[in-house]
């Protein structure tokens, strides 16, 4: 039966189809045709077994049994029933059905699989046999159903299990690379040619669990993947065991001839756990004598001689906050390549091809591939004086900094805008003595970020970036690319290593988790504002502890607080109270419902050597406090949130609805010549006009906006309220 022609389908990961087609032709297959995620071909069982044994790209080799149009579920049942399944399996065999593709009437793969299963089971019952069992785990025979353009193709798997599993990788690290993809990268990097050079050396300086190097050694030693697998031929009864034995003998002979390879594979990584897995994987693969692993940080790698091929898959940034560090890793990789691999071929596989510029070497070829569902690229370099960037601009020397070459056109425009703002706004801030200020506020709509500078008491600059919500018309991919370029532009222009840059990203459809800090916990830093020293934290919370736009109002309170009793409602971290106390206030009372903010306020008071006896902290709902309060004040600062429904109180605050009551209660607590400062950051807020009939109201918004917030003059609104003159 092995001499009869059959139709087959070899499945593979997307983007590996051309390489798989070439392999199948080398195995003697005919009528080889590529399609998405696979290749169809015709041939004998002998040629199919060669594909099973030697293909490094294929995931499965499927023998096709039938194909027909299936407009509905009944037609699907009929298609499955047209195959005599009793000729392809016995009632004692377990089976499973893998379904892919849908039509207008067949919308669910689970239903498609169920309908085919019904046809198979009914057929066995109708023939008087026991029905075979369905087993989703390790079935004796796997049946494949693929629907494409309204037609179903039905077939059986020649082998139990996926062919990408070679058997040596019994343990793996995070985000492991499949063996098939590793082999594809090596072929695209021309390793099958390079490995035949005298004493060829292949290096992976970030080898992880060693998959790339192990596959490279197996390739050089001509060890067929089928010799490593424990998977056996499936329970399909028409297998030609003699043909399979011929193929195995051929593979064994090639392995013996390949054992004379004199090359070497060198891997290094800083992760000892991964290196342990790599060594055990290499031993199981039988290539231990040809692979050497060492615990070496990337920047410390010393090779002694240029390798034949340096190939690596740098780690991905799992969170945006990690990106600056990973980008710095790319720059360090470039430094290593120029130092240790001049004259070598280099291949870098990355899901961030734009970061390839950070390597500082011109890529002569790129291949689009997928790592699972993630689009990626293999960048190929020939390292010589012509390919190395001659004018490589580095932001600042240091392992966590990136190059200006990483900026695309939009990123470069953003960098230019940042430089302009630093020149103008930065000069103004220095002249005014402001160490904390806004340097960029969505000046370019496509880069919708607020970027703030916080300078600590030691003079170290820290950057806080906060993303505005992107329009629905901007795709997630475009938003992420712009975000990445914004981080790069900030780091390059401000010449800061990554640890001094914090970014909070507004994620889509994440409920309450709208912002993700760069790190879960951040260190407090102390900044100076006028006379006050204040604690801020750029990473731990949504806000930093200091609203920069209220700087003029804190200055106003400081200048008008001497000898007065000051009430600070919704006090947040107490910065207004600190400024009032330092301005000579007789006493301050700070009220907030949050124990976290009050603790922060207490630390701010202590930092400025202000005692609690004359600077009282009250943990209470502010509306309830005003209803209970019997003390009078000379100055009240009222800056409520737009909306609040804290679990700690039954009161639900809506500032548009409730501001009249809050103001009325505050005015009752003011002494005759007292002043209420009312502020809100609600953009569409409208002050109740009836209040003007009872109080003297002075609009103060224009005077409350400093130069660094001039672009966004509705970031808050402020009114000064006094009792009407009698």
Image (spheres, helix red, strand yellow):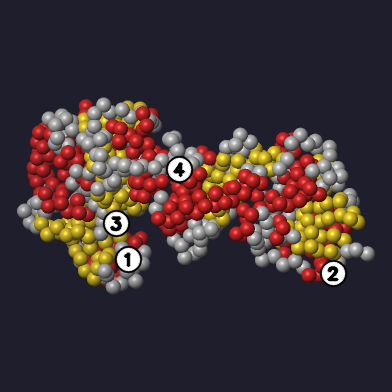
Say if mark 1 contacts mark 2, CB within 8 Å: no
Report which residue position mark 1 lands on: 102
Q: Which mark is residue 97?
A: 3
Report which residue position mark 2 lands on: 693
Quarter residue 71 falls in: bottom left
User: Looking at the image, which is closer to me, 18 or 329?
Assistant: 329
Looking at the image, which residue sits at the far bottom? 71
Say if mark 2 contacts mark 3, CB within 8 Å: no
User: Label 1: how many residues lie within 10 Å, few (<14), some (14-19) or many (20+)?
Assistant: some
Q: Which mark is residue 324?
A: 4
Q: CA–CA distance between discs 1 and 2?
A: 69 Å
Looking at the image, which residue sits at the far right? 726
* Rendered location of residue 705, percent (x, y): 68, 56
Q: CA–CA distance between discs 4 and 2?
A: 56 Å
User: Looking at the image, which is closer to me, 556 or 164?
Assistant: 556
User: Looking at the image, which is closer to me, 444 or 322?
Assistant: 444
User: Looking at the image, which is closer to me, 448 or 458?
Assistant: 458
């Amino acid at each position: 039966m092995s001499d009869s022609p059959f139709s087959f389908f070899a499945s593979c990961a997307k983007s590996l189809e051309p390489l798989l087609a070439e392999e199948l032709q080398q195995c003697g297959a005919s009528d080889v045709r590529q399609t998405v995620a696979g290749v169809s071909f015709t041939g004998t069982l002998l040629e199919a077994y060669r594909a099973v044994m030697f293909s490094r790209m294929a995931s499965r080799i499927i023998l096709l049994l039938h194909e027909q149009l299936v407009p509905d579920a009944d037609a699907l049942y009929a298609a499955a029933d047209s195959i005599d399944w009793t000729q392809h399996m016995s009632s004692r065999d377990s089976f499973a059905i893998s379904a892919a593709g849908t039509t207008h009437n067949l919308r669910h793969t689970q239903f498609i699989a169920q309908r085919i299963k019904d046809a198979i089971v009914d057929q066995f019952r109708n023939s008087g046999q026991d029905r075979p069992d369905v087993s989703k785990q390790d079935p004796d025979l796997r049946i494949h159903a693929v629907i494409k353009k309204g037609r179903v193709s039905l077939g059986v798997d020649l082998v139990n299990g996926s062919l990408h599993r070679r058997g040596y990788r019994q343990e793996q690290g995070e985000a492991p690379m499949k063996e098939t993809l590793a082999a594809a990268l090596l072929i695209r990097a021309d390793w099958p040619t390079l490995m035949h050079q005298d004493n060829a050396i292949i290096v992976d300086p970030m080898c992880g669990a060693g998959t790339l190097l192990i596959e490279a050694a197996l390739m050089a030693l001509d060890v067929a993947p089928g010799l490593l697998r424990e998977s056996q031929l499936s329970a399909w009864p028409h297998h030609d065991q003699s043909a399979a034995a011929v193929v195995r003998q051929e593979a064994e002979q090639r392995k013996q001839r390949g054992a004379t390879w004199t090359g070497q594979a060198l891997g290094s990584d800083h992760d000892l756990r991964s290196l342990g897995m790599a060594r055990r994987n290499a031993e199981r693969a039988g290539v231990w004598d040809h692979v050497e692993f060492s615990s070496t940080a990337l920047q410390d790698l010393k090779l002694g001689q240029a390798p034949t091929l340096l190939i690596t898959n740098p780690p991905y940034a799992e969170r945006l906050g990690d990106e600056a560090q990973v980008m710095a890793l790319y720059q360090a990789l470039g430094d290593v390549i120029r130092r240790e691999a001049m004259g070598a071929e280099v291949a870098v596989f990355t899901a961030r091809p734009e970061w390839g510029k950070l390597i500082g070497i011109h890529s002569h070829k790129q291949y689009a591939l997928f790592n699972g569902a993630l689009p990626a690229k293999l960048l190929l370099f020939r390292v010589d004086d012509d390919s190395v960037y001659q004018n490589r601009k580095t932001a600042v020397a240091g392992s966590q900094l990136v190059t200006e070459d990483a900026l695309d056109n939009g990123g470069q425009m953003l960098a230019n805008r940042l430089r302009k703002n630093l020149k103008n706004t930065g000069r103004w801030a220095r002249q005014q003595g402001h160490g904390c200020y806004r340097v960029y506020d969505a000046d370019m709509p496509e880069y919708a970020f607020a970027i703030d500078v916080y300078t600590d008491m030691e003079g170290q600059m820290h950057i806080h970036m906060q993303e505005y919500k992107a329009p629905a018309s901007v795709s997630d991919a475009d938003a992420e690319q712009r975000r990445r370029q914004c981080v790069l532009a900030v780091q390059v222009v401000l010449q800061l290593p990554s640890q001094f840059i914090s970014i909070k990203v507004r994620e889509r459809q994440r409920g309450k988790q709208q912002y993700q800090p760069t790190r879960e916990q951040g260190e407090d830093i102390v900044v100076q504002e006028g006379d006050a020293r204040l604690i801020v934290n750029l990473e731990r919370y949504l806000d930093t502890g200091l609203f920069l736009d209220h700087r003029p109002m804190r200055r106003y309170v400081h200048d008008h607080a001497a000898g007065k009793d000051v009430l600070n409602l919704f006090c947040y971290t107490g910065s207004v109270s600190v400024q009032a106390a330092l301005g000579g206030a007789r006493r301050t009372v700070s009220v907030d419902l949050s124990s976290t903010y009050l603790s922060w306020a207490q630390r701010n008071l202590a930092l400025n050597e202000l005692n609690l006896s004359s600077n009282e902290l009250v943990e209470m709902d502010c509306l309830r406090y005003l209803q209970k309060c019997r003390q009078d004040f000379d100055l009240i600062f009222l800056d409520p949130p737009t909306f609040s429904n804290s679990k700690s109180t039954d009161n639900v605050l809506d500032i548009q609805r409730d501001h009249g009551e809050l103001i009325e209660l505050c005015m009752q607590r003011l002494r005759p010549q007292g002043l209420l400062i009312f502020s809100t950051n609600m953009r569409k807020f409208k002050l109740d006009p009836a209040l003007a009939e009872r109080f003297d109201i002075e609009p103060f918004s224009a005077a409350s906006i400093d130069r660094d917030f001039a672009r966004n003059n509705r970031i808050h609104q402020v009114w000064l309220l006094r009792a009407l003159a009698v």
